[in-house]
Amino acid sequence: MLIIGPPGSGKGTQAARISERLGVVAISTGDIFRDNVKRETPLGVEAKTFMDAGDFVPDSVTNRMVRDRLAADDVQEGFLLDGYPRTASQVAELDDILRENELALDVVLQLTADDEELVRRLLGRAELDGRSDDNEQVIRHRLGLYHDQTAPVVSRYDERGIVTRVDGIGTIDEVTDRVMTALKVAR
Ligand code: AMP
C-alpha cells in the first residue's frame, strides 16, 4: 500500500503504526534520504540541496533508490510506501517496478488536512526536531508542490478505485483509529 499526504499530515507517524500493526515493512523515501544526508553518502550529498530548498530530489536519483529498495526480499509479503510516488512520472515508474517484481497495490491511503493547520504543525516540529526543511518559506513551497504535483498522483489512483481518504486532523491515536477502520473496509 501507499500512504500519501501533504507535509505535516502525520504520514510518517501513521506509517510506523500501520507497519507495526499489520506487520508490513514501511519504506519512507524521506527517511532514506535523511539517513543518507546524515551519513554524508554520495546519495545524501546529491539529495541535500534539493531537500533543504523543499524541492523534489530528481527522479534519476529517487527512482533508482526506490527500485533497489523494492527488489529486497522483505517487501514480498507486503509493504507500505511513504512519500513515493510524488509525481505523475513516478507513478509510471512505480507501475513498472511493481510489474517487474510481480507486486501490486491494494490500497492508497490519503491523509488530508488543511494548509494552515499543516503550517502550524510543521513550525512546531521545527522547534522540536530542527529539520532543515521546516521553516515557513520552505514549508509553503513544499505544500505548493504537494498541491501541484502530488494531488494529480492521487487522481490517477482514484481512477483505479483504490484510494481511501482519512481525515488527518485530531490526536495521533484518533487518526490511527480512523486509518485502521478505513483499512479494514478497504481490504
Ligand atoms: P518527506 O519526509 O516525505 O517529507 O520528504 C522530505 C524530502 O525528501 C522532500 O521534501 C524531498 O526533498 C525528498 N523526497 C522524499 N520523497 C521524494 C520523492 N518521491 N521524490 C522526490 N523527492 C522526494
Image (cartoon, grey):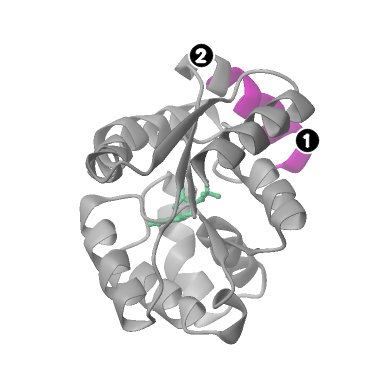
Of 134 and 81, nearer the camera is 81
Spot occupied by residue 138 in the image (x, y as percentages of width and height): 46, 35
Q: Which quadrant would residue 179 be assigned to in this image? A: top right
Indicate which label's residue lies in the foreground, 2 or 1.
2
Q: Residue at x 69, y 18 (%)?
A: 170
Say if 127 sits above or below 96 in the image: above
Is residue 46 highlighted in magenta? Answer: no
User: Total of numbered circles in the picture?
Assistant: 2
Of 87 and 168, nearer the camera is 168
Spot occupied by residue 72 in the image (x, y as percentages of width and height): 54, 84
What range of the chain is rendered magenta? 119-131
* Mark 1 residue element: helix
For label 2, the residue is 116
Amino acid type of the residue tagged 1 in the rendering: Leu
Marks 2 and 1 sit apart, C-alpha to C-alpha, by 19 Å
Q: Which quadrant would residue 125 be assigned to in this image? A: top right
Q: Residue at x 39, y 39 (%)?
A: 163
134 with respect to 177 (left or right): left
Q: Residue at x 71, y 34 (%)?
A: 176
For label 1, the residue is 128
| Dominant SS type (magenta) | helix
